[in-house]
């Protein structure tokens, strides 16, 4: 690598939104030297996920391909970041010897020095890695109208199946004032929506403010028109938070509320700290306060010891709650977790059959719920052109549903627009601009909504 020209890096990201945010943080730390193709980079970084075995296998497969880039330029450095780097450490280098280094989620400040990048941001060296929040680093956010912000890191919940607390460390929140500073900067750059991220975001506590306080502070930033958040743990979804979502117009009426199982027996084995009944009570409370709310969830099928009867309870819970969407996973043993000590008793074919059954059921429910919106006018935040269909644009409703439409007016191509829903599939709504007088009244309403506060 020549010292004369600025060094360049390429980063490939696996895993959840938190990891995507972390890649933006890394890009912020390494300043403006990102490139779009690995063959053009002095440094190739892979930000990894360890949540299921399948996620790790994909990363290992990708790393195998990177060997060619190393052979093409042996001076090129290859680094593995993220949750799998933390879980496997040097074992990863033993399995893929062309990898130069591994660095877990709390170690990214070391990157500029490690890579010899010329511009190094100034910061106080943080001796206690486990308390790292990167609160002083401004990430290089990907372009668009919506940005993510990690407001807390780590997790204390130790759900028995989950690797996250082991690879991300203990829970720690960023000071609310720092979060607001980052949101203001995003608003100045033209972002309209922010999503506040945390593994268990509603247990946010910076010593002074809880998550409801933070939502209100973020919602008061001028220029931001929508605030989202993920992920909520049912045990920490307080009445105060529900009422804040209900009363703050900018806070979107969507709660991602992972249930994991509908069987109280399995929930206990999962260490989720709520029963089926307690979960349903929370759902009831949300729907009373916010009748139009969209609810989505995560489900694990085939947890150790899950019987037909337990599975039936999950199925019936999905039917009862009627989620707008559900991510269904089959259980994957994570070494070192509490559940790894239980026999992985449900055969793979059975796990897949249960997963497919829930996916079929959820698809029917999503379709029914989306069809019920046909004819309604929805406020849509336009994200940009549909790359797959020239002429079409894509946006999202407040409830996080994707809407595609073909704008005929220039002003419908950005910002908040009101569209009539004319058709629906299980995953997509199809919208149309409002016409004539209806359109004029509606866009006046949209402007009023956008300039609230
Ligand atoms: N913090 C969030 C998300 C954690 S990971 C939460 O608490 O909900 C995202 C999802 O992956 C989880 O909700 C869970 O459904 C799934 N998951 C986590 N560990 C898993 C495992 N070992 N096997 C299968 N799915 C898992
Ligand atoms: Fe994992 Fe549970 Fe923490 Fe979510 S709340 S990250 S599932 S341990
Ligand atoms: Fe995966 Fe780490 Fe996120 S394990 S799901 S990338 S926190």
Image: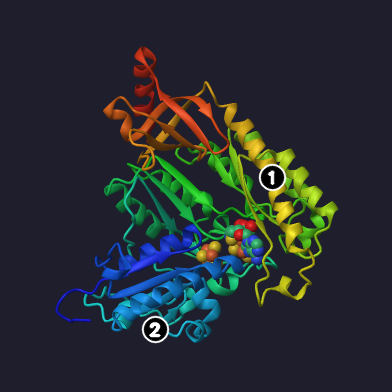
Mark 2 vs ligand 3: CB below 8 Å: no
Q: Give 243 or 171, whichever is nearer the viewer.
A: 171
Residue 110 vertical position relative to residue 31 in the rendered view, above or below? below
Residue pictured at 42% horizontal, 44% vertical: 219
Task: Name the element at disc 1.
Answer: helix
Name the image quarter holding the C terminus.
top left
Q: Where is residue 362? Give x, y as percent.
A: 66, 42
Q: Where is residue 232? Give x, y as percent.
A: 59, 53
Residue 320 vertical position relative to residue 114 in the rendered view, above or below? above
> Is 418 on the left or on the right of 236, as rendered?
left
Q: Where is residue 408? Give x, y as percent.
A: 31, 25
Name the image quarter holding the N terminus.
bottom left
Q: Give 273 or 354, whichever is nearer the viewer.
A: 354
Residue pictured at 51% horizontal, 83% vertical: 95
Residue 444 vertical position relative to residue 128 in the rendered view, above or below? above
How far, Cα to Cα, is label 2 from label 1? 48 Å
Q: Residue furthest left?
A: 4
Residue 136 visible: no
> Is 335 on the left or on the right of 220, as rendered?
right
Q: Give 274 or 85, whichever is nearer the viewer.
A: 85
Residue pictured at 32% horizontal, 35% vertical: 414
Task: Name the element at disc 2.
Answer: loop
Residue pictured at 28% horizontal, 65% vertical: 34
Residue under pointer 2:
100
Q: Which of the two discs, 2 and 1, labels the residue nearer the N terminus? A: 2
Residue under pointer 1:
282
Q: Where is residue 199? Give x, y as percent.
A: 55, 60
């Amino acid at each position: 690598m020549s010292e004369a020209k600025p060094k360049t890096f390429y980063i490939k990201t696996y895993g959840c939104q938190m990891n995507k945010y972390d890649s933006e943080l890394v890009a912020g730390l390494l300043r403006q030297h990102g490139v779009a193709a690995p063959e053009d980079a002095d440094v190739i970084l892979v930000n990894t996920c360890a949540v299921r075995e399948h996620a790790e296998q994909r990363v290992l497969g990708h790393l195998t391909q990177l060997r060619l880039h190393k052979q093409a330029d042996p001076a090129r450095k290859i680094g593995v970041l993220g949750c799998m780097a933390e879980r496997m450490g040097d074992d990863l280098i033993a399995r893929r010897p062309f990898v130069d280094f591994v660095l877990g989620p709390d170690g990214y400040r070391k990157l500029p020095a490690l890579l010899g990048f010329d511009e190094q941001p100034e910061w106080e060296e943080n001796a206690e890695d486990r308390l790292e929040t990167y609160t002083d680093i401004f990430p290089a956010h990907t372009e668009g109208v919506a940005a993510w912000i990690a407001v807390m890191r780590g997790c204390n919940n130790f759900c028995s199946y989950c690797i996250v607390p082991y690879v991300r460390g203990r829970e720690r929140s960023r000071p609310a004032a720092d979060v607001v500073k980052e949101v203001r900067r995003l608003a100045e750059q033209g972002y309209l929506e922010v999503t506040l991220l945390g593994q268990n975001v509603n247990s946010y506590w910076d010593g002074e403010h809880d998550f409801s306080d933070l939502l209100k502070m973020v919602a008061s930033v001028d220029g931001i028109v929508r605030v989202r958040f993920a992920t909520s743990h049912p045990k920490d979804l307080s009445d105060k938070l529900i009422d804040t979502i209900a009363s703050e117009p900018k806070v979107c009426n969507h709660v991602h509320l992972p249930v994991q199982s509908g069987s109280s027996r399995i929930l206990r084995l999962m260490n989720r700290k709520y029963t089926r009944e307690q979960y349903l009570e929370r759902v009831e409370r949300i729907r009373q306060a916010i009748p139009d709310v969209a609810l989505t969830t995560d489900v694990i099928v085939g947890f150790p010891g899950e019987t037909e009867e337990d599975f039936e309870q999950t199925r019936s819970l999905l039917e009862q709650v009627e989620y707008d969407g559900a991510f269904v996973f089959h259980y994957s043993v994570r070494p070192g977790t509490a559940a790894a000590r239980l026999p992985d008793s449900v055969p793979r074919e059975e796990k897949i059959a249960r997963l497919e059954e829930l996916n079929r059921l959820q698809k029917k429910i999503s379709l029914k719920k989306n069809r019920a919106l046909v004819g309604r006018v929805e406020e849509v935040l336009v994200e940009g052109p549909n790359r797959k269909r020239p002429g079409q644009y894509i946006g999202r409703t407040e409830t996080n549903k994707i809407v595609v439409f073909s704008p005929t007016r220039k002003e419908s191509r950005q910002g908040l627009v009101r569209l009539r829903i004319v058709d629906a599939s299980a995953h997509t709504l199809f919208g149309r601009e409002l016409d004539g007088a209806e359109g004029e009244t509606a866009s006046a309403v949209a402007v009023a909504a956008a300039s609230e506060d």
